[in-house]
Image: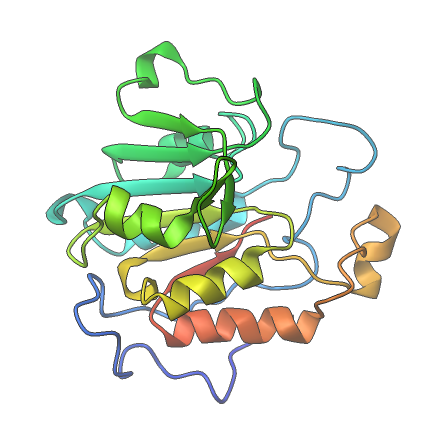
Amino acid sequence: MFVYSENAMDPRTANTNAGHSVSYKQLNIEKLEPEYHFRKNYYLKRTKDIESKDHLLEHLLGRKVNCSTFQRQVLIDLGAKTFESSVGWFIENYPCNFEEIHAFEVERNVFRIPENEKGRVRLYESFVGVESSNTKTDIADFIVNKLGIKTDDFLVIKMDIEGTEYKVLDYLKKRGTWPLIDELFVEIHYKHPYMRPWGWDMFEEYTLEDATNFFVELRNHSIYAHPWP
């Protein structure tokens, strides 16, 4: 279970990143393990999006700040799958009218933008990585240079990139991009006996402790971070 760490700074008194658009964060940490972290029936059959995200609703940063007071309101979905699985969920449930939505889904013909959303939703059929190529997008370069995100913008990122989240987020930290992120939703991957019955124990490289430390560090850097199921 993800609990408050003695080493975790209280975000109400911590020296947060200079210029971060939201300098006050309430440390309402949801459970890290076990029930909200993975799709228990995913390995049985392909489905739309069987896991509930209702437990996230009360913790959304958009309920604590007025998104409309920020220069821009931007959602980036890394590993979007279908429109309904996450972008549609944010449009329906997040208390912020995102002006820009950028969705990355490498599997072709899976993510289809509804006609009424083609003005603000853009699809990128590319892998998310730490360098740019014909098939990969350097996500730090995308955020800073392509989108031109500033600290007075409201940026929400959802990330489901199948185990590479540790590497990508560490890269974003090294590139100095963390202060631009207001809220982060991450499907975190690790190996734990609880996951074995549902076929989600294949991520040998990381443990529950790694995942816990990972979220504590994000929170300590004033990123309002949640596990994404």
Seen at 33% across and 55% down, the residue is: 61
Seen at 38% across and 84% down, the residue is: 9
Residue 125 at x, y = what percent?
49, 29
Residue 110 at x, y = what percent?
57, 21
- Residue 95 is at least partly visible in this image: no
Q: Specify the quadrant that holds the N terminus.
A: bottom right
Quadrant housing residue 47:
top right
- Residue 91 is at least partly visible in this image: yes
List the single residue furthest toward the front.
133
Quadrant housing residue 98:
top left
Residue 189 at x, y = what percent?
66, 57
Residue 214 at x, y = what percent?
54, 71
List the single residue furthest toward the top.
115
Give the total of numbered labels: 0
Seen at 34% across and 64% down, the residue is: 178
Q: 8 above or below 138?
A: below
In depth, the one of 2 and 46 nearer the eye is 46
In depth, the one of 206 and 95 nearer the eye is 206
Seen at 40% across and 14% down, the residue is: 114
Q: Is residue 221 left or right of residue 189?
A: left
Q: 75 above or below 190?
A: above
